Image (cartoon, helix red, strand yellow):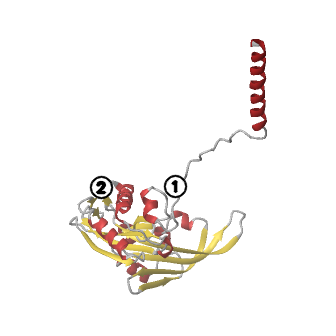
Amino acid sequence: MKKSFVILSILIITFILTAFGYYNIGETSPIPIKFEKKEKVFLKNDFRKAVMEDIDPDFYLKVGSRFNTVISKNELHHAKSIIDILPKKATQNKANFNSVSIGILEKDNELVKYGNNEQLSSDQLSLLKTAEYSTNFYVISYCNNLLDNGAIENDKISYYMTVVPEKEAEFHKGSKGLLDYLKREIKTKLKDYSKNKLRPGKLTFTIAKDSSIKFIEVNSSSGYTKLDNTFIELISNTKDLWSIAANARGEKVDQEFVLFYGKMGC
């Protein structure tokens, strides 16, 4: 009797295990879920978030002279030809300069004098003598370009330049320090705006010889008045943080700077 009970128990257990095995036939092991690291996504026009997270928002920022090519007033006033004025690379392999135009750019108009070759005419010399610090001017001339294979081709030189002091004014932490300051401050001051509506902003200011900052003026709006005013405030707050410009005799002089911001442009 006892033996029969044991055999019956074994049969029951075998049946249960077999049935459970059939129940799981066709089931697959669960596939592990891979949790991918989510990347931060910013809306196209959400500039403030982008700046706060140090994402490049294609926001242009530059401080300097009106034009990248500069010349000191002392060098300009002693120039006898356009060779003395232009960067060396501009006149290399060039010959037969003609139809030379020298123009001083003013707010409402320009004063232009003409010459026949690289030597400055008396009118051009007189015009350049009137150029003061921060004067913007151009030199345009037709010429020949001498190619490496000995051939000659027609060419044109066109340079826009700014007159700077012999010792330029400088922010106490240098140009990079000034840009770092501006970038850091706009992170907390800017409001959201549409990047598609952003325009090239341009603000001029003068570091005066008495250490003040004068003539802060928005020449071209970025399209956002609050943004323009923010930069006016930031530049105003750098008072007493500049070394003053000086002329060839070491005398302190004013120097104008241009802050370009927003969308890249002229």
Q: Residue at x 37, y 63 (%)?
A: 186
Q: Is residue 153 above or below residue 183?
A: below
Mark 2, residue position:
172
Q: Is residue 119 above or below residue 1?
A: below
Q: Is residue 12 above or below residue 146?
A: above
Q: Residue furthest left?
A: 210
| Quadrant in the picture for residue 244 | bottom left
Q: What quarter of the picture does the N terminus occupy?
A: top right
Give the side of residue 167 with respect to residue 158, left or right: left
User: Label 2 crowding class (10 Å Cα cut-off): few <14, some 14-19, many 20+?
Assistant: few
Taking depth in this image into account, of 180 and 135 the one nearest to the observer is 180
Q: Looking at the picture, which amino acid does disc 1 mark?
A: Lys
The number of callouts visible is: 2
Query: Residue 94: x, y in percent?
Result: 60, 69
Mark 1, residue position:
40
Query: Residue 144: x, y in percent?
Result: 63, 73
Q: Looking at the picture, which amino acid does disc 2 mark?
A: His
Q: Residue furthest front?
A: 1
Residue 150 in sight here: yes
Give the side of residue 231 with respect to residue 28, left or right: left
Give the side of residue 18 with respect to residue 48, left or right: right
Taking depth in this image into account, of 203 and 93 the one nearest to the observer is 203
User: Label 1 crowding class (10 Å Cα cut-off): few <14, some 14-19, many 20+?
Assistant: few
